[in-house]
Image: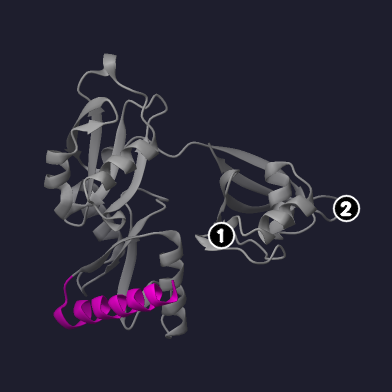
Amino acid sequence: MENDNSMLIGHIKDLASRAYQNDYTTHTNFLGLSELAAVLDEINKSGGSAANQVYNGVKFTLYGGYEDSERNVLCFLPSYLDAESLKLQEDEGGSIVSCLKVVPVNAKFADKLTHRDFLGSLMNLGIERDIIGDILVSEDGQVAYLFILKDMEELICKELIRIKHTSVKCISVCNKECDIRPSFEEISGSVASERLDAVLALVYRISRSQAQELVSRQLVFIDGRCAFSAGYDLKEGSRVSVRGHGKFKYLGQTGSTRKGRLMIKVAVYK
């Protein structure tokens, strides 16, 4: 993993240098949470600013096709383009990320398809995972939106014709036309602190000791990285996944009780 990250960091440096020297947009493939965390760490260590989105004197932004996407492309920008302008261009149908709407040819005989079904079919075509961004599937499994790299759009439209026992067709649409979002339930409650074990206990209705055991068994991941300490203080916006339990996004503090406990809110993904 460390070697993979060093290769990724080298690639990021090269992309930033090319964007600076040639004054055009460069970008990565889709990055997962752990890869993105490694990149942002590198940016901060190198004297750049992940918060201000500047690295080696080059502006950058993240784009995944819709607001709050989990998988994102890191784009380095030329001098004449800002982050908001790039996002507006891409939303309308840009040159980096494409959106494919996948629907059954005959809905009457269609399976109820899941995220895993769509991802599996794409991987079976020999497509690498970093070509694919988020996959958003309707609750009835009849419609999905696939965010992919633009240059793979034609191939996928041609080759993705069957998922499980269902014949499907792909329609290229503007990114902003995707009207499906991950479904979640907001949960509020009080905790003694923002420690990981305290929040896990609240979310999954387990004891603190059970939460600590999940961490010790290396079943808990924060922003794609394995959590090794139950005493880690969660930060607002952190995405937490627990094998066998699901995942949630920590939305932060909302107040405090008279006894000094913290009121917090999380979004638990269904």
Specify whether residue 2 is painted magenta: yes
Q: Is residue 208 left or right of residue 233?
A: right
Q: Main secondary structure of the magenta part?
A: helix
Q: Which contiguous range is marked in magenta?
A: 1-24
Location of residue 163 in the rendering, given as x and y in whole percent from the top left corner = 27, 32
Q: Which residue is mark 2?
A: 259
Compare residues 182 and 175 and report the one nearer the observer. 182
- The amino acid type of the residue labelled 2 equals Lys
Circle 1 packing at 10 Å, graded few (<14), some (14-19), many (20+), is many
Taking the spot 29% from the left edge, 30% from the top edge, the residue there is 164
Q: Which residue is mark 1?
A: 222
Residue 100 sits in quarter: top left
Taking the spot 25% from the left edge, 80% from the top edge, the residue there is 14
Taking the spot 20% from the left edge, 39% from the top edge, the residue there is 173
> Of the residues tagged 2 and 1, which is closer to the observer?
1
Residue 80 sits in quarter: bottom left
